[in-house]
Image (cartoon, rainbow, N blue to C red):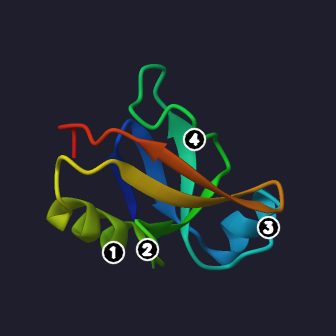
Amino acid sequence: MNPAAGHLWGLTLQDLTPEIAAFFEVPVSSGVLVSDVEQKAPAQEAARGDVITALDGVPVASVAELTTRAGTREEAAPVRLSVRRAGRQIVLTFPAAADR
């Protein structure tokens, strides 16, 4: 079975599996992998290989969960993504965009 994939905020996303985590040398086994970032993405601070672990402070474990939460959030509020990058946890904040 292929991992679930999706597209939000100019990011190409896929479910993090143990195999994908090993390939990207990511120590976490739960979250959503950023596999590509569009040049003019609203979330342009994100990087290929980042693992999204939470949206607006609420943990996410899959693309489906992230997509569902993104669709129910208040549109005017800035998006806050908790991301694991190179062993560090950081928070990316950007304006919400209409391309959900």
Q: Residue under label 4, please give it.
A: 46
Q: CA distance from mark 4 to mark 3?
A: 20 Å
Could you tell me the amino acid type at mark 1?
Glu
Look at discs 3 and 1 and give the one toward the viewer.
1
| Residue 9 horizontal/vertical position (percent) | 35, 41
Could you tell me the amino acid type at mark 3?
Ala
Q: Nearer the viewer, residue 30 or 4?
A: 30
Q: CA distance from mark 1 to mark 2?
A: 5 Å
Quarter of the image holding residue 70? bottom left
Q: Residue under label 1, please give it.
A: 65
Query: As drawn, is 100 to the left or to the right of 43?
Result: left
Q: Residue under label 2, please give it.
A: 62
Whichever of labels 2 and 4 marks the residue nearer the N terminus, that label is 4
Circle 1: is it few (<14), some (14-19), or many (20+) Cα within 10 Å?
some
| Residue 23 horizontal/vertical position (percent) | 78, 59
Whichever of labels 1 and 4 marks the residue nearer the N terminus, that label is 4
Secondary structure found at label 4: loop
